[in-house]
Image (cartoon, helix red, strand yellow):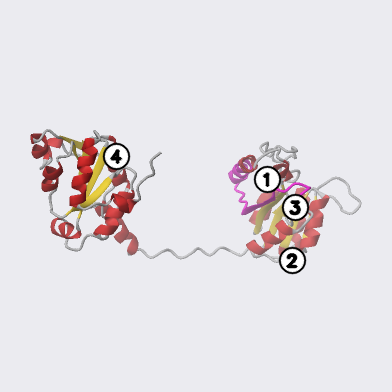
Amino acid sequence: MTAALKPIDKILTTEQVDAWVAAERAAGHRVGFTCGAFDVMHAGHAQYLAEARAACDRLLVAVNSDSSIQRYKNPLRPVNPWKERAFVVAAMASTDCVTVLEEDRPLSLILRWKPDFYIKGGDYASAALRSGSAVEAYGGQTVVIPPQFAASTTAMFERIQALAIHAAPEQSQTAEPRGLVLLDRDGTLVRDVPFDPSRIEILPEVIGALRKLQDAGFRLCLVSNQQGIGLGYFGYRDFIDGNRRLLRALGAAGISITKIYFCPHSWGETCKCRKPAPGMLLRAMREQNVPASRCVMIGDSVDDMAAAKAAGCTGFYLGPIHPAYSSCSIAEATDKIVEAIPK
């Protein structure tokens, strides 16, 4: 495979293009020629150059010089100098050779190299090309490529100008949360289906409890051990897809989860995030800027409670009977939280 030329190697003087065209013709290649300012590249330019290259074997692009643009477009243009514009055009995979167009019209270059195809972009007929008759006179063909995008450099400038005179809006003031409620996922919010995070069945009382917490001013986050990822039973995408279903169901009930913190490590891996370690809880309190005194953990396992204790926050246990913890429902935990943490 032949190595691709660097953009700078594609930029040639008109004299060097003489030799380039001769070599391409000798190799049996059909040369296409096009030209333009290419001041600020956009999707329309990219589409046009790609289709121009598809119409020939080798594409030669003449980029208008700065002085020619000042004459036929605007004395304040171009935005970018010729060297930079030529480099960008040369960097396109669709271009094989780039040179300068010093005159306002390309006729002299067309007659100098007599390309097989004279290619222009636009929504007009090929007969309307001013240099078209000269191309046909020496046996060449004119090709017009219609635009697929409603993009133009002028429109881009107008949009940039409009954006520049608009002041960026102030950030909205987010109310400080009354507190932070950290929620275990499997067995607490949804039915625990070992190593299948895609099966989402929200448990009874969850919707009402979360809505009550949110309405009372509490911010809600998930903190979940997902060792099945580390053990290879499922992947990140499976876990995230399951969460999308959960968030969609909660969102339909008007409930917003601010952030999902999870530990993907297996039991055999050493980490600071897997509960009963407090890493996820401490990170959540830090990032949500809520002190431990206003943070609670709701979970169905002893590990959830141990993590809450290690993080310095209160834990509410929803699991089976245990000698160290008194169990409650999520609705009961919600009532206690709303009562215990002042507004």
Q: Which residues are magenta?
A: 243-269
Of residues 340 and 232, the one nearer the viewer is 232
> Of helix, strand and loop, which one carries label 2?
helix
Q: CA distance from mark 2 to mark 3?
A: 22 Å
Q: CA distance from mark 4 to mark 1?
A: 49 Å
Foreground residue among 338 and 239: 239
Determine which residue is flagged by label 2. Answer: 293
Q: Is residue 110 left or right of residue 258?
A: left
The three-letter code of the residue at mark 4 reads: Gln
Lower position in the chain sequence, tag 4 or tag 2: 4
For the residue labelled by badge 4, is the local secondary structure a helix, a strand or a loop?
loop
* Residue lying at 79% horizontally and 61% vertically, measured from the top left: 310
Q: Nearer the viewer, mark 1 or mark 2?
A: 2
**Does residue 200 show up magenta in the picture?**
no
Of the residues under marks 3 and 4, which one precedes in the sequence? 4
Question: Could you say which disc has been placed on residue 148 in the image?
Answer: 4
Residue 73, given in percent of the width and then of the height, sits at 16, 56
Q: Position of residue 270 (x, y in %)?
A: 76, 53
Could you classify mark 1 by the number of other residues whose Cα lies within 10 Å: few (under 14), some (14-19), or many (20 or more)?
Answer: some
The answer to which quarter of the image holds residue 159 is bottom left
**Point 74% across, 39% down: residue:** 191
Left or right for 321, reference 251: right
- Residue 311: x and y in percent read 76, 62
Mark 4 or 2: in front is: 4
On screen, residue 283 versus residue 82, left or right, reads: right
Which residue is identified by label 3?
A: 274
Mark 2, Cα crowd under 10 Å, few <14 / some 14-19 / many 20+, is few
Instruction: Identify which amino acid the numbered label 3 is placed on.
Output: Arg
